[in-house]
């Protein structure tokens, strides 16, 4: 009984390892398909860039984004190859074990057949029974003969099963080796694409260097506008905090220490729900790719210039719309001098900010729901670039949106 339990435990471990490997392979293949879709999408964005301008910073940034995704794709293929290598090693071990077991079964079966041949005469079997000393011994000998026949039949069946298992494993091994060869070829193709994209990026950077002075002026102007908008957003949020605290004092409620909100019960519940959805919030666009992450970065073409991003920049298709990432209330609509518009949505003591909009579908005080469209994203006619600038705040503190948005 204990032996049977050990066998069952061994088999369950084998199946669980096999199941894990299959799940891992399926997961890697899904990731690979997703990465390939992202590359295709960035290619469509680059086509829009090229229609508008031969060389642009938007092109460099999108190519750099595609290079990053391509590298992720190569890493994904490497992981799949490693998984297959492990599967091939395990399959070879299984085949060796089955071959050894099959040889032992065949040798054992040959011995049984030989013994059966030697005692094939029915007279021999009858004499074996009649020569028993007593009835009990005769019954034991009869039972032995029955078990011997049954054992011989079982050995034959085991040989048949093992032969089938061996043939199945050999076929699976052939498939896995073929899959590995295809993956290696795919990896080489992706490496070639990667080198081509790096060269393409350098060509665009080279073309932009010829207009270095104009590019530097553009960068400074954009940074100046970005800083002005950021200062305005900070003032708005600080004013909201001041109003909330003032209201709390008038109602004789004890305020928090520091510059934080005294939230209503409804706002507290909303903020609580918002926090619970950290890393699960939907993207503020239906489809897009992050082309500039949160924090400090060197400029894609001017390596001596550092860009500070207070949120994330998401490149999307022309005509795309921004959407609220959670239920909330539109607290402010900002109209910048250049024509681009910004919306601030309050979620308790959390804020989400949607900048670089050409059209706005909501007004101050409007209640919005998750994934509700709030405005159309501006498309730069000179570069063909459509980028949503998205920020997330907690009280007066900036947050990295990548920590909040699902799989960003």
Image (tube, rainbow, N blue to C red):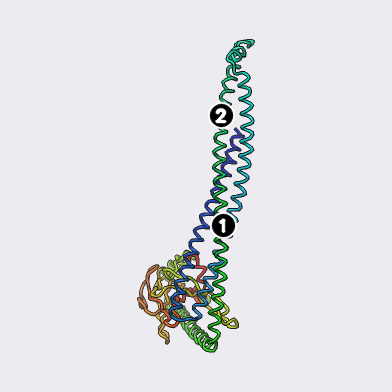
User: Which residue sits at x=48%, y=85%?
Assistant: 225
Judged from the image, the secondary structure of the residue bearing numbered disc 1 is helix
Please determine whether, in this image, residue 159 is positioned above or below residue 394. above
User: Which residue sits at x=61%, y=47%?
Assistant: 90
Point out residue 66 in the picture as x, y percentages from the top left corner: 52, 70
Q: Which residue is mark 1?
A: 80
Mark 1 closeness class: few <14, some 14–19, many ≥20 residues within 10 Å: many
Mark 2 closeness class: few <14, some 14–19, many ≥20 residues within 10 Å: few
Whichever of labels 2 and 1 marks the residue nearer the N terminus, that label is: 1
Numbered label attached to residue 164:
none
Q: Is residue 11 visible?
A: yes
For the image, the number of numbered tags is 2
- The quadrant in which residue 372 appears is bottom left
Point out residue 7 in the picture as x, y percentages from the top left corner: 59, 38
Q: Which residue is mark 2?
A: 154
- The quadrant in which residue 111 appears is top right
Marks 2/1: CA distance?
Answer: 41 Å
């Amino acid at each position: 009984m204990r032996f049977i339990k050990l066998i069952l435990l061994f088999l369950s471990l084998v199946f669980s390892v096999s199941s894990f490997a299959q799940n891992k392979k399926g997961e890697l293949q899904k990731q690979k398909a997703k990465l390939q879709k992202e590359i295709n999408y960035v290619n469509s964005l680059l086509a829009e860039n090229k229609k508008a301008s031969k060389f642009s910073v938007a092109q460099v940034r999108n190519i750099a984004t595609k290079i990053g995704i391509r590298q992720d794709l190569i890493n994904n293929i490497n992981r799949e190859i490693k998984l297959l290598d492990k599967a091939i090693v395990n399959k070879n071990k299984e085949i060796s074990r089955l071959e050894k077991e099959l040889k032992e079964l065949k040798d054992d079966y040959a011995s049984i057949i030989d013994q059966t041949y030697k005692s094939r005469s029915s007279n021999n079997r009858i004499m074996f029974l009649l020569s028993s000393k007593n009835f009990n011994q005769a019954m034991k000998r009869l039972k032995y003969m029955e078990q011997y026949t049954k054992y011989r039949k079982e050995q034959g069946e085991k040989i048949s099963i093992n032969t089938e298992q061996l043939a199945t494993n050999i076929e699976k091994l052939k498939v896995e080796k073929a899959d590995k060869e295809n993956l290696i070829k795919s990896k080489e193709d992706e490496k070639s694409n990667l080198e081509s994209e790096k060269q393409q990026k350098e060509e665009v950077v080279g073309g932009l260097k010829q207009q270095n002075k104009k590019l530097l002026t553009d960068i400074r102007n954009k940074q100046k506008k970005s800083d002005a908008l950021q200062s305005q957003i900070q003032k708005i949020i600080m004013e909201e905090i001041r109003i909330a605290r003032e209201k709390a004092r008038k109602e004789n409620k004890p305020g928090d220490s520091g510059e934080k909100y005294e939230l209503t019960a409804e706002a507290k519940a909303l903020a609580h729900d918002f926090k619970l959805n950290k890393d699960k919030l939907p993207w503020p666009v239906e489809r897009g790719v992050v082309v500039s992450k949160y924090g400090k970065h060197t400029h894609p073409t001017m390596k001596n210039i550092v860009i500070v991003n207070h949120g994330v920049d998401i490149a999307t298709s022309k005509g795309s719309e921004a959407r609220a990432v959670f239920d909330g209330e539109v607290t402010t609509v900002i109209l910048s001098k250049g024509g681009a518009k910004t919306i601030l949505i309050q979620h308790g003591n959390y804020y989400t900010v949607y900048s670089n909009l050409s059209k706005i579908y909501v007004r101050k005080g409007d209640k919005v729901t998750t994934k509700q469209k709030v405005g159309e994203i501006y498309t730069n006619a000179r570069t063909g670039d459509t980028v949503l600038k998205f920020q997330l705040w907690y009280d007066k503190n900036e947050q990295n949106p990548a920590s909040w948005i699902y799989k960003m």
